[in-house]
Amino acid sequence: MARGEDGSVLERLRAKRVCICVGAGGVGKTTISAALALGVAARGARVAVVTIDPAPRLAQALGLRELSSEPRPVDVAALTAEGARFDGELWAMALDAKRTLDDAVRQLAPDRSTRQEILANPIYRELSSALAGSQEMGAMVKLYELREQRSFDLIVLDTPPSRNAVDFIETPTRLLGFLEGRALKVFLSPGGLAARMFGRSSALIFAIFARVTGVDMFADLSRFFRSLAGVIDAFGARTRAVASLLRDPSTTFLIVTSPEHAPAREARFLARTLGARGMLRGGLIVNRVHHLDGGGQHSPAAVQALLKERLGASLAARAALNLAEFEQLARRERDAIRRLSAELEEPDPVLVPDLEEDVHDLVGLAQVAGHLFS
C-alpha cells in the first residue's frame, strides 16, 4: 500500500483496507482522520476519506469550500509547490445519507420497473428521508460500496461522537434483526398483517382519507410493500456483508481521544464496546497533548529570578506562574495518558501535540500528519 517507510501509524495501517476513526466529540477526530488519509496517500496509496459528520470541518481541513456526496480528488498542489513529496491520490467526500440509500435501491432492485416504483413511491420517500436522518445507516451502505466497488487502497471513515459511533457499529445487527425477523415476514406474507390491514374496513377508511386529502395512501402502501419484497433479500445480503466487513482483518478501528477526563472515559467505553463485538482495535491516538519539552527544570522562583532583570518584577512573576501552570498541566496529561494506555493495553499510543490553532488547509493538515507518521 505504501513505500517501505515505517511509522507507528503507518505500520498499524499496513494491509488494512478500512480504517474507522471513533472517539468523543471535540477531540479533533475529523482532523486526525483527514491527516491519516493524507499521510498514507502521500506515501503512494489511493485513499478516500469520508465523513458522516454534517459539519464542514473536513472540507475546511482539506482547504475546500465544500465536499461532494461522491468521492472527488483533492488537489495537493499546495503541498507539492512547497517541495513536499506526494506519490498517491487523496479523495474526499461527505455522506449524503438520502442519496446513498436511493443508490442502494437502484442497485438492489431486481428490475427497472421495481426500482422506479420504489423510488417514486411517496411512502418510500418519507421513510428514506427519516432513515437518512440516521447517518449511521447511510454510512454503512456507502462503506460497503466504496470497499467493494471502488479501487481504493484505504478508506478512512470519520464518525460522529462515540455514542453515535456505537450506533454505526450496531446498525448491521439491528437491521438484520428487522429484515430477517418474524414480524416483517408476517407483515409481508400473503394473508398476513399487511393483507389484513388492507381489508374491507381499512380500505373504506383509506378511501375517505383519499377523498379528503387527495392522497391515495391505500394504493401507495400497497405498491410500496409489493415492491419492497423484491429488495429485502438483496438488502439483507448486503447488510450481512457489512457486518462481516466490520470484523474483517482488513478493517481496523482507531480510537481518537485527548488527555482530558471525559474524552478518556469515552475512549475506555469504546475500547470495551469494540472488544465485546469482536472488532479489531488498531491503536490509540491522543490528540492535543501539551509536552514539557525539557521543562520542569527550575522552580517558579528561579524562573522569576532569571527573567526579572529583562522583564521587570511584575511581568517576570506572571511569566513564572504561567510556566508553572503549564508544567502542571503537562504532567497531569502525561499521567492521564499513562493510565489510559495501561487500561487499554496500548503501550505505545500515538501522541499529537496541541498546535494551538485550527487546521484549515493542506499545509496545516500535513503538519498533523507529520506527527502521526513520525
Image: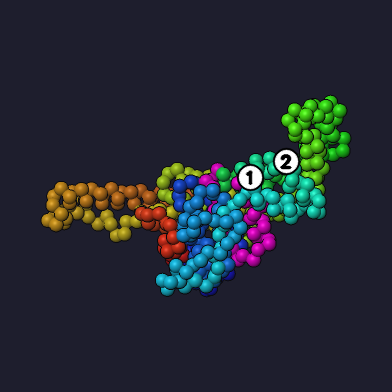
Q: Which mark is residue 122?
A: 2
- Which residue is found at the position 28% from the left and 57% from the top? 295
Question: Could you tell me which quadrant the N terminus lies in?
Answer: bottom right
Residue 133 in which image quadrant: top right
SS of the residue at dot 1?
Answer: helix
**Cα distance in 3D space between marks 2 and 1:** 15 Å
* Percent position of residue 28, x then y: 46, 52
Identity, as a three-letter code, of the amino acid under mark 1: Ala
- Which residue is found at the position 64% from the left and 48% from the top? 98
- Which residue is found at the position 49% from the left and 67% from the top? 76
Question: Could you tell me which quadrant the C terminus lies in?
Answer: bottom left
Magenta segment boundaries in residue numbering: 134-163
Looking at the picture, does residue 71 appear above or below residue 25?
below
Q: Which mark is residue 118?
A: none
Most foreground residue, 342 or 125: 125
Label 1 crowd (10 A; few <14 / some 14-19 / many >=20):
some
For residue 332, side relative to residue 246 (left or right): left
Q: Is residue 189 visible?
A: yes
Q: Nearer the viewer, mark 2 or mark 1?
A: 2
Looking at the picture, does residue 42 appear above or below residue 276?
below
Q: Is residue 344 visible?
A: no
- Which residue is found at the position 56% from the left and 64% from the top? 73
For residue 48, side relative to residue 83 (left or right): right
Q: Which mark is residue 132?
A: 1
* Percent position of residue 333, x then y: 38, 50
Q: Is residue 298 magenta?
A: no
Total labels: the figure holds 2
Looking at the picture, does residue 1 appear above or below residue 159?
below
Most foreground residue, 249 or 172: 172
Identity, as a three-letter code, of the amino acid under mark 2: Pro
* Percent position of residue 6, x then y: 49, 69
